[in-house]
Amino acid sequence: MGIRLKKYLKQDCLYWAKTGVTTAGKVTYAPVVALKCRWEDGMQDHLMDDGRIITSKAHILLSTNVTQGSLIYLGTMATWKLLPNYPAVPTPQQGGFEIIMVGKTPDMKGRDLLVEAWL
């Protein structure tokens, strides 16, 4: 039996995958993708590989693979288009958050994948 995530993933989010960094140090992103998620606000401390402690502001569940360093925004394409800096990616003040950590858990048969991301 699979994880059956669809009944839990009821919220809409937008995802910009990090594609690289320019020579000027600016991060570049792939075109936006709309995803379904479960978004839970809440602060939690995480010990990173380099020894730093980072506090996440939200924990989200997805059925789609995401990568660390990418951006995610809780909302739809329509709400993003209402932001004053559209078509640029949303700023943290507008609800655009960087993914600081990702965890993946497959089901027992390896068919479904639960992806957790901390922002």
Image (cartoon, helix red, strand yellow):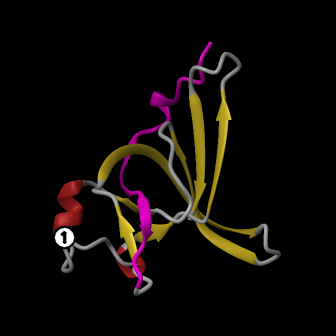
* Residue at the image position 79 percent from the left and 73 percent from the top: 50
15 part of magenta stretch: yes
* Disc 1 crowd, CA 10 A, few/some/many (<14, 14-19, 20+): few
Figure quadrant of the C terminus: bottom right
Residue 88 picture location, percent across and down: 24, 73
Quadrant housing residue 112: top right
* Residue at the image position 47 percent from the left and 39 percent from the top: 64
44, above or below 77, in the image: below
Figure quadrant of the N terminus: top right
Q: Which residue is labeled 1 in the image?
A: 87
5 part of magenta stretch: yes
Residue 60 picture location, percent across and down: 54, 52
Q: The residue tagged with tag 1: helix, strand or loop?
A: loop
Quadrant housing residue 47: bottom right
Residue 61 picture location, percent across and down: 55, 45
Residue interval drawn in magenta: 1-23
43, above or below 67, in the image: below
* Along the line of sight, the residue nearer the viewer: 63 or 43: 63
